[in-house]
Image (cartoon, rainbow, N blue to C red):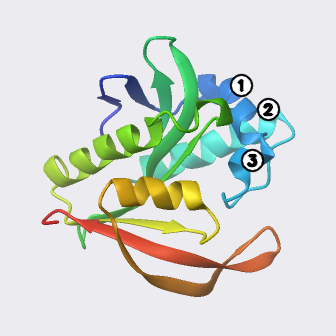
Amino acid sequence: MIQHLYTKRLHLRKMTSEDAASLFTIWSDSDVTAFMNITNFTTKEQAEEMISFLDRLAQDHKAIRFTIIERNANEIIGSCGYNSLDFENKKAEIGYEIAKKHWGKGFAPEAISTLMDYAYNRLDFHRIEAKVEPENVNSVRVLDKLGFTYEGTLRQSEKAKDKFIDLQMYSKLKTD
């Protein structure tokens, strides 16, 4: 599986344990984690454990997560990746988060576009999915900007932070 992807402003590098301190800073911000299926982290060890968990999924070809690095500043600004890879059905689910100080700069659509391009053209996938909490208007805007189609609401489909939550399903087909 690919280890590095590049855009004009970003370097997407497969997440490693060396990223733990920077990702801890991002994952400890309650504004960033508000719509993630984790509570904001309180120790760097939690970030290390998450990276280890994500690495095991990558080794099993079930998922892969990239650290997003802003190239000019050489600064870690978030992460993104394929939350699930389904080679049989040629589809993937994407996920992403950006450090709050970098919101509104177009980094999320730039990173996601690169993930989509790789999935469609290198993995020969047919469908990219994203599940978003209805209140996460920033993520909905990112998906709209990228031409995703809203397919419907999955009512109380996951338990997050001790409550069942609705998720909106978005998708984009290679042929769209």
For this orientation, the residue located farthest to the right is: 42
Residue found 66% across the figure and 45% down from its top? 50
- Is label 1 in a helix, a strand or a loop? helix
Label 2 near label 1: C-beta < 8 Å? yes
Question: For residue 93, what is the image quadrant?
Answer: bottom left
Residue 22: x and y in percent read 67, 25
Is 47 situated above or below 166? above
In depth, the one of 159 and 33 nearer the eye is 33
Residue bearing the label numbered 3: 31
Type of amino acid at the residue the image marks with label 2: Lys
In depth, the one of 170 and 42 nearer the eye is 170
Is residue 122 left or right of 113 when viewed as pictured? left
Is 67 situated above or below 75? below
Label 1 near label 3: C-beta < 8 Å? no
Gap in angstroms between the C-alphas marked 3 and 1: 18 Å
Quadrant in which the N terminus appears: top left
